[in-house]
């Protein structure tokens, strides 16, 4: 069923299929931070993120946002459309945290209204440098119209996800998206998971995402389990 390995990333592996328009993405148990400097293999991490990602891709599809997601082949194997990835990490921030607080004069937790989009060039060797609109268009990575389209999609996705999490007393602080081209369209690719979102309990400000691992704040697998049992109990029941 799988053809050759196309790409082994830090947390997922891509395989070709007999259909050149489709790939399978296998969510591994690897977890990394700080550009791969910190690395561990944690049982169940892959399937937790795969389950969350599949759920959010389907949620977006129900709101008419086109994504690469086709279906799950098993608990860690996602069949997707084969995109020509755009090498950008599109981040939208509802409250200041992470690199925003390290680089700029803003206190952690400050509400950013309207939300701020920041875009990094996805290139580990260069340390994912921050881009701006002129660099993105000047280097021909996107046309101005494509850049606007991606920002607009990101804002719409943010509204959908914020509304979803608000129903569970969880604040979506920020998250990262990756887009790619497919048959003349720009689709959302990669993943939406606890590795790519920053989530806080609305009341206690407890982290419910990969910051628990980044900052050695506890057992990240327990955190992922707790988050899933809160937002997707029917999916969480499938895990032991
Ligand atoms: N639908 C898709 N088609 C092609 N490539 C994809 C698709 N979705 C995600 N990717 C790419 O596959 C890789 C996923 O593996 P990951 O472990 O996240 O890698 P990385 O360490 O580069 O972030 C990423 O480089 C991502 O850009
Ligand atoms: Mg990645």
Image: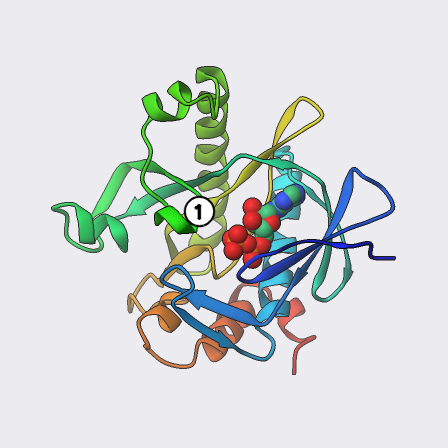
Residue 220, image quadrant: bottom left
| Above or below 152: residue 47 | below
Q: Is residue 113 left or right of residue 86?
A: left
Q: Is residue 158 left or right of residue 34?
A: right
Q: Residue at x 59, y 64 (%)?
A: 232
Q: Residue at x 41, y 20 (%)?
A: 137
Q: Is residue 235 left or right of residue 1?
A: left
How many numbered discs sit on the rendered protein? 1
Secondary structure beneath disc 1?
strand
Q: Is residue 190 visible?
A: no
| Above or below 166: residue 159 | above
Q: Quadrant of the N terminus?
A: bottom right
The residue that label 1 is drawn on is 176
Residue 14 in percent (x, y) is at 68, 54
Q: Residue at x 43, y 45 (%)?
A: 123
Q: Quadrant of the C terminus?
A: bottom right
13 or 172, nearer to the observer: 13
Residue 224 in percent (x, y) is at 50, 71
| Above or below 95: residue 84 | above
Q: Is residue 91 left or right of residue 98?
A: right
Q: Is residue 165 visible?
A: yes
The crowding category of the residue bearing disc 1, from other C-alpha atoms within 10 Å (few below 14, some 14 to 19, many at least 20), is many
Residue 3, image quadrant: bottom right
Disc 1, ligand 2: is the CB inside 8 Å? no
Residue 33 in percent (x, y) is at 40, 64
161 or 138, nearer to the observer: 138
User: Please, which colouring scheme is shown?
Assistant: rainbow
In the picture as drawn, the residue positioned furthest to the front comes out as: 125
162 or 91, nearer to the observer: 91
Residue 74 in percent (x, y) is at 77, 64
164 or 105, nearer to the observer: 105
Q: Residue at x 66, y 77 (%)?
A: 239
């Amino acid at each position: 069923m799988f053809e050759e390995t196309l790409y082994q990333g830090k947390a997922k592996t891509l395989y070709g299929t007999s259909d050149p328009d489709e790939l399978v993405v296998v969510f591994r148990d690897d977890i990394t931070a700080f550009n791969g400097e910190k690395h561990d293999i944690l049982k169940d991490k892959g399937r937790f993120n795969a389950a969350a990602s599949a759920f959010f891709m389907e949620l977006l599809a129900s709101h008419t946002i086109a994504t690469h997601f086709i279906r799950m082949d098993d608990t860690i194997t996602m069949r997707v459309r084969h995109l020509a990835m755009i090498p950008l990490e599109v981040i939208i921030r509802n409250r200041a945290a992470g690199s925003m607080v390290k680089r700029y004069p803003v206190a952690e937790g400050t509400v950013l209204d309207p939300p701020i989009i920041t875009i990094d060039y996805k290139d580990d060797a260069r340390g994912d440098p921050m881009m701006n609109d002129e660099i993105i268009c000047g280097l021909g990575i996107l046309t101005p119209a494509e850049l606007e389209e991606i920002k607009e999609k990101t804002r719409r996705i943010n509204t959908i996800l914020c509304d979803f999490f608000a129903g569970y007393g969880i604040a979506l602080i920020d998250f990262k998206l990756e887009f790619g081209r497919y048959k003349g369209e720009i689709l959302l690719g990669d993943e939406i998971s606890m590795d790519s979102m920053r989530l806080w309990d609305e009341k206690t400000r407890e982290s419910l995402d990969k910051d628990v691992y980044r900052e050695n704040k506890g057992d990240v697998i327990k955190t992922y389990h707790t988050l899933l049992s809160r937002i997707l109990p029917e999916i969480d029941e499938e895990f032991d």
